[in-house]
Image (cartoon, helix red, strand yellow):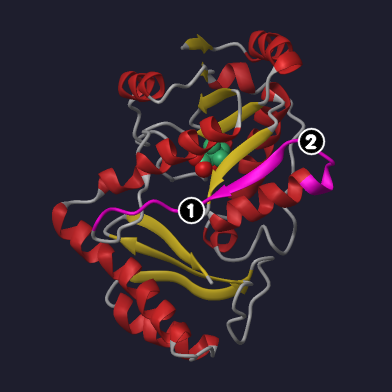
Amino acid sequence: MKIITDPLELKEYLKEVAKEHTIGFVPTMGALHEGHTSLIKRAKNENDFVVVSIFVNPTQFLKGEDLEKYPRRDEADKKICTLSGVDVLFFPQASDMYGDDEVSLQAPHVRGYILEGTTRPGHFNGVLTVVMKLLNIVSPTRAYFGKKDAQQLNLITLMAKQLFMSAEIVAVDTVRESDGLARSSRNVYLTSAERQEALKISASLYMASKMVAQKSLDSHAITSKMREILEPLEVAYVEVVSRDFVPLQEVQIGNSIILVEAKVGSTRLLDNIWI
Ligand code: PAF
């Protein structure tokens, strides 16, 4: 596996690769887990050549968030990438990615400022800006993102479409632990008691899917029941939205996502199910 830290060197290198190969790209912030390896596996299955980036992007963290203590596992991550058959690992520093007087992207005023955008105003500006930079550096055939970060995935898909970008954005299913907890780099912050509490999140979604299976489609009824299960966690939101992130009064089968964000101890966790 080749490791490249310089964006322009990577861009030049991949220009040659792209002449004869399809390129699959998996952008990450490191602390790789099975959620990431499932993205890499999918990228390997669907492309000739796979690039992974590891970059803890400072612009998507708000003041007071966990940028400094965000888990960094550089050596373990390199090993995981090598063992997963990654061809190139892109490992830039913030100074390689950002200058002083930056052009940046604004997330859309509605979709970028609801749900996760309410609890983290401005977060998606940073996400879109860095993903745009990464996609311009790598110019992949396909780029892979997890459904767990559903709003991020929606905004990146929208950006790729509205800015006429050529990469296909591929959505990949959430990977869960055997007890239902969605894999997340932030799970390492949880104590064992908190981890147990965190299971209320997937349990609430499981209940929601059961209600839908029993044809109970009213969003308020579903989210109220979920909130009962989530007690006493500090819930930021429980919402039913369409795949385009428009709030729904009633679940539409095939076009809905039920989302939760809740704090367990001091750790914010996200999860959702696509219905
Ligand atoms: O989902 C993530 O890990 C990050 O938000 C991403 C897409 C790599 C951008 O920094």
Instruction: From the top left corner, tell me how far across and down residue 103 is, in percent.
Output: 77, 32
State whether residue 252 is above or below residue 99: below
Instruction: From the top left corner, tell me how far across and down residue 142 is, in percent.
Output: 66, 35
Judged from this view, the residue extending furthest toward the left is 193
Residue type pointed to by label 1 = Asp
Taking the image as shown, residue 165 lies to the left or right of residue 63, namely right
* Magenta stretch, overall SS: loop
Identify the residue position indicated by label 1 in the image. Answer: 173
Q: Assess whether residue 230 is covered by the magenta stretch.
A: no
Identify the residue position indicated by label 2 in the image. Answer: 166
Spatial CA span between label 2 and label 1? 23 Å
Taking the image as shown, residue 118 lies to the left or right of residue 99, namely left
Q: Residues within 10 Å of mark 1 (few under 14, many from 20)?
A: some
Magenta stretch, residue numbers: 161-178
Q: Do the numbered discs 2 and 1 sit on residues whose CB atoms are within 8 Å? A: no
67 or 71, which is in the foreground?
71
Taking the image as shown, residue 88 lies to the left or right of residue 14, namely left
Instruction: From the top left corner, tell me how far across and down residue 112 is, in percent.
Output: 67, 57
Taking the image as shown, residue 69 lies to the left or right of residue 63, namely left
State whether residue 225 is above or below residue 176: below
Q: Which sits earlier in the primary sequence, circle 2 or circle 1?
A: 2
The answer to whether one can see residue 50 in this image is yes
Q: Assess whether residue 162 is covered by the magenta stretch.
A: yes
Residue type pointed to by label 2 = Ser
| Numbered circle sitting on residue 46 | none
Instruction: From the top left corner, tell me how far across and down residue 206 is, in percent.
Output: 36, 74
